[in-house]
Image (cartoon, rainbow, N blue to C red):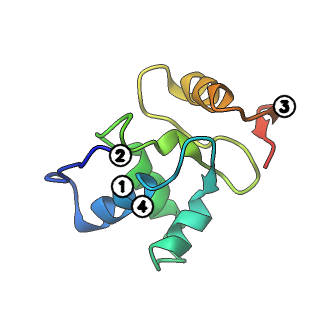
Amino acid sequence: MKKLNFNIGTEFQKLVWKEIAKIPNGKVITYQDLAFKINRPKSVRAVASACGKNPFLPEVPCHRVVRKDGSLGGYSAKGGINKKKKLLENEGHKFVKDKIIF
């Protein structure tokens, strides 16, 4: 993985983005899982917000973070949610009615 210089964003956002950068190709986690990984289990919505403000695409692959019910959540990059789904399909993930199969 390319070394990133997290010179923008709040400390919380940087924490979230650094953890997202660790998610390997072909794996997904939930916003809730991510909140637990950064020791902020009650900050699920803030984690989702930080994902939406990610300026480091594609090096910080926020498309690999989904809702716990399997729906995709959001994707603020060009192409929106359809792009997120396509990226995940390209990594081998399958969907049923727009929900990812874990």
- Lateral position of residue 64 relative to residue 3, left or right: right
Percent x, y for residue 25?
A: 55, 42
| Number of the front mark, 3 or 4 | 4
Residue 97, which numbered label?
A: 3
Residue at horizontal 57%, vertical 59%?
31
First in residue order: circle 1 vs circle 3: 1
First in residue order: circle 4 vs circle 2: 2
Residue at horizontal 63%, vertical 49%?
28
Give, as a three-letter code, the residue at label 2.
Met
Percent x, y for residue 9?
A: 21, 54
The residue that label 4 is drawn on is: 19
Q: Secondary structure at mark 1?
A: helix
| Number of the front mark, 1 or 3 | 1
For the residue carrying disc 3, how many other residues have a C-alpha within 10 Å: few (<14), some (14-19), or many (20+)? few
Q: Is residue 82 above or below residue 35?
A: above
The residue that label 1 is drawn on is: 17
Give, as a three-letter code, the residue at label 4.
Glu
The answer to whether mark 1 and mark 3 are in CB contact below 8 A is no
How far separated are the C-alphas under marks 4 and 2? Answer: 13 Å
The residue that label 2 is drawn on is: 1
Q: Is residue 57 above or below residue 34?
A: above
Give, as a three-letter code, the residue at label 1.
Trp
Percent x, y for residue 96?
A: 86, 33
From the viewer's side, name the closer residue of 81 and 62: 62
